[in-house]
Image: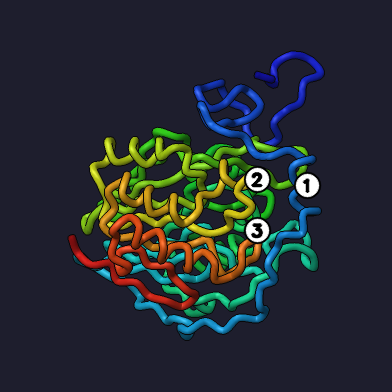
Amino acid sequence: MTTASGSGRKRNPYYQGPTSDHFDGLRFFNPGGVGPGNSLDLLKWQLAGGRVRWPNPVISMFPPAKPDRHVFGQQMRVTMVGHASMLVQIAGLNILTDPVWSERVSPFRSVGPKRVVPPGIRFEDLPPVDLVLVTHNHYDHLDVATLARLQAVHRPKIVTPLGNDTIIRRTVADADITIVDWGDRIAVKGGVTIDVEPCHHWSARGMGDRRMALWAAFVLTTPAGKIYHVGDTGFHDGINYEAVRQKHGGFRLAILPFGAYEPRWFMKGQHQNPEEAVKGMKLCSAAYVAGHHFATFQLTDEGIDAPVQALDVALKAEGVEPDRFRPLRAGEVFDVPAV
């Protein structure tokens, strides 16, 4: 593999550290995995003309939520903001996942995927935010404009994998960031710990920085149960799901993506589809799933309702009760049953 050592070699602008089983000195990679498509693959996809047109705007069936300030005891509550952005309330902590309140997920203000449904929580209605989990640096997951707003109002702790801190600090210089690698475990307040686990994905903010910052999933161990949070992943033969079950022994809740998956020839390695998400739920032994990554920004070819329709079919095929895998719409509140 190419390394960053030696004169004249390319330098990683985000992270300089020792090589590992998933970092070659320049780029991160999925051991035994599939890399993202190249520029020619991208052009082939874009010219194929298979994209289903989404309605815009979309009115959610749920009004904007106004969350309680805290939840305690055995309560575990997830409120959908949109796409991969959720408010998780547990053990007195308010946690945001991959928060995006911006209108577009793009390096440009007027070009790129645009939000079709308003955020399910108005920014002004957020309770005090203690913790932000940023899984990787794609624009639909790492939105520096939103992180700057959160810093100005809430000053949360941000937990993110190697290299993403450099991107965040360019906009939010005084952010409280904990930088993590796969296999790390950190403690946060309220008796909550976070384990950093592999997922099968990639990263980029432009054309010249592919896989130069790490991506990850998180396991939260809390007094009310365990949560497995995955921001983006390919199924990867279920390897990571099986490994996380063996390590952590199952979950009260898994937060899993199940949208943005067509065309399969291009997306399969990086984005699981609904059938794979349901298989993942079973492999990691999750009692319940909060499903995300759909019906907010059109990133891929499938229609806006296709993920939910395919999910219904997959749940029946796998014998999983529909109320155990909840595809959350903007503004929807999911009080996770105790197990």
- Residue 74 % position (x, y): 20, 65
Query: Taking the image as drawn, is residue 103 in sight?
Result: no
List x then y, in percent, for residue 56.
67, 79
Residue carrying label 1: 44
Q: Point out the tag, 2 or 3, that comes first from the N-terminus.
A: 2
Whether residue 195 is situated above or below residue 306 in the rendered picture: above
- The foreground one among 281 and 11 is 281
Q: Secondary structure at mark 2?
A: helix
Residue 300's mark? 3
Residue lying at 66% horizontally and 73% vertically, measured from the top left: 54
Residue located at (81% from left, 53% from top): 47
The first of marks 2 and 1 along the sequence is 1
- Relative to residue 59, is residue 206 drawn left or right? right
Type of amino acid under label 1: Lys
* Amino acid type at image mark 3: Thr
The image quarter containing residue 19 is top right
Answer whether residue 288 is visible to the viewer in this image.
Answer: yes
- Badge 1 marks a residue whose secondary structure is helix
**Could you give the CA–CA distance between mark 2 and mark 1, rounded to whole angstroms?**
9 Å
Residue drawn at point x = 47 percent, y = 59 percent: 97
- Upstream in the sequence, badge 1 or badge 3? 1
The residue located at (65%, 68%) in the rendering is 102
